[in-house]
Image: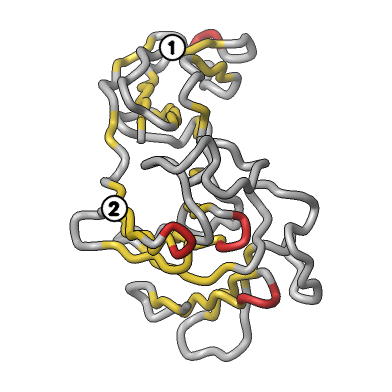
């Protein structure tokens, strides 16, 4: 699979090399590689082990309006989400929130499982469509839903462990937490994908100037 971003940059799912390559607009030389630990000269399946940085026969790619990347990681039975410009995934579909498993139909065939996902696409509303090849179906995932953010006057505790808690949402399959200097911001902290049984996260990177920070939790 191939995809273009709004600037004309090209993303290629290099299936047999277990990587995705990024080519700047107009160039035929890749300048970024996903799935091989930054190396352009390796093609190891799950290089370094199954993780947020590994790939195994990626077959499809898609980009949202913000330039974030979705990859159908076929042989790992998952879809990975990468923030624009990053080669480390921060969200995983099909593995119950875990970046270190690659079980087909993990937990049984359900709305949360995948088996050889082959293609991915996004509509104008940010809904994700996955061709779940091995399960003979197409799944639609709505965009992540933000929870209620709240200002937290804890920034003077920088250097200490500051915990954030959230209430579980019925039916959620994963959570993640952003902390920033504005509602919905994430310039201080991004948790990445957390399991559906995780309801707190500790942050150690808050500023020490007494400013208010905002925590936003998301569920999928």
Crowd tier of the residue under label 1, counting other residues whose Cα lies within 10 Å: few below 14, some 14–19, many 20 or above:
few
Q: Secondary structure at mark 1?
A: strand
- The span from disc 1 to disc 2 (Cα, nearest Å) is 29 Å
- Please identify the quarter of the rendering in which residue 169 is found: top left
Q: Position of residue 11 (x, y in %)?
A: 50, 75
Crowd tier of the residue under label 2, counting other residues whose Cα lies within 10 Å: few below 14, some 14–19, many 20 or above:
some
Q: Is residue 38 visible?
A: yes
Please state which of residues 216 and 130 is positioned toward the viewer in this rendering: 130
Quick check: 129 above or below 7? Answer: above
Q: Secondary structure at mark 2?
A: strand
Residue under circle 2?
Answer: 140
- Which of the two labelled residues, at mark 1 and mark 2, occupies the earlier sequence position? 2
Q: Is residue 38 left or right of residue 192?
A: right
- Please identify the quarter of the rendering in which residue 150 is found: top left
Quarter containing the C terminus: top left
Q: Is residue 7 left or right of residue 12?
A: left
Q: Which mark is residue 165?
A: 1
- Residue ID at (48%, 90%): 26
Q: How is the image coloured?
A: secondary structure
Q: Position of residue 39 (x, y in %)?
A: 76, 68
Q: Position of residue 181 (x, y in %)?
A: 38, 28
- Residue ID at (39%, 9%): 153
Q: Nearer the viewer's eye, disc 1 or disc 2?
A: 2
Q: Is residue 90 left or right of residue 44?
A: left
- Residue ID at (39%, 77%): 4
Q: Are marks 1 and 2 in contact (CB under 8 Å)?
A: no
Please state which of residues 155 and 55 is positioned toward the viewer in this rendering: 55
- Please identify the quarter of the rendering in which residue 173 is found: top left
Quick check: 219 above or below 50? Answer: above
């Amino acid at each position: 699979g191939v995809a273009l971003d709004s600037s004309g940059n090209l993303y290629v799912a290099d299936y047999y090399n277990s990587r995705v390559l990024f080519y700047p607009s107009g160039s035929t030389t890749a300048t970024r590689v996903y799935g091989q630990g930054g190396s352009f000269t390796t093609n190891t399946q799950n290089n370094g082990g199954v993780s947020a940085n590994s790939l195994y026969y990626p077959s499809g790619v898609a980009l949202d309006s913000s330039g974030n990347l979705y990859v159908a990681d076929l042989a790992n039975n998952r879809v990975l989400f990468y923030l624009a410009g990053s080669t480390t995934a921060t969200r995983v579909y099909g593995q119950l929130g875990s970046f270190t498993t690659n079980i087909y139909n993990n937990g049984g065939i359900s709305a949360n499982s995948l088996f050889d996902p082959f293609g991915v696409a996004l509509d104008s509303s940010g809904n994700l469509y996955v061709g779940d090849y091995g399960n003979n179906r197409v799944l639609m995932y709505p965009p992540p839903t933000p929870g209620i953010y709240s200002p937290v006057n804890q920034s003077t505790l920088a250097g200490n462990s500051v915990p954030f808690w959230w209430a579980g949402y019925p039916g959620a399959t994963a959570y993640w937490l952003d902390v920033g200097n504005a509602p919905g911001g994430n310039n201080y902290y991004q948790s990445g994908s957390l399991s559906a049984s995780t309801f707190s996260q500790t942050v150690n990177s808050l500023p020490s100037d007494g400013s208010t920070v905002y925590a936003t939790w998301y569920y999928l």
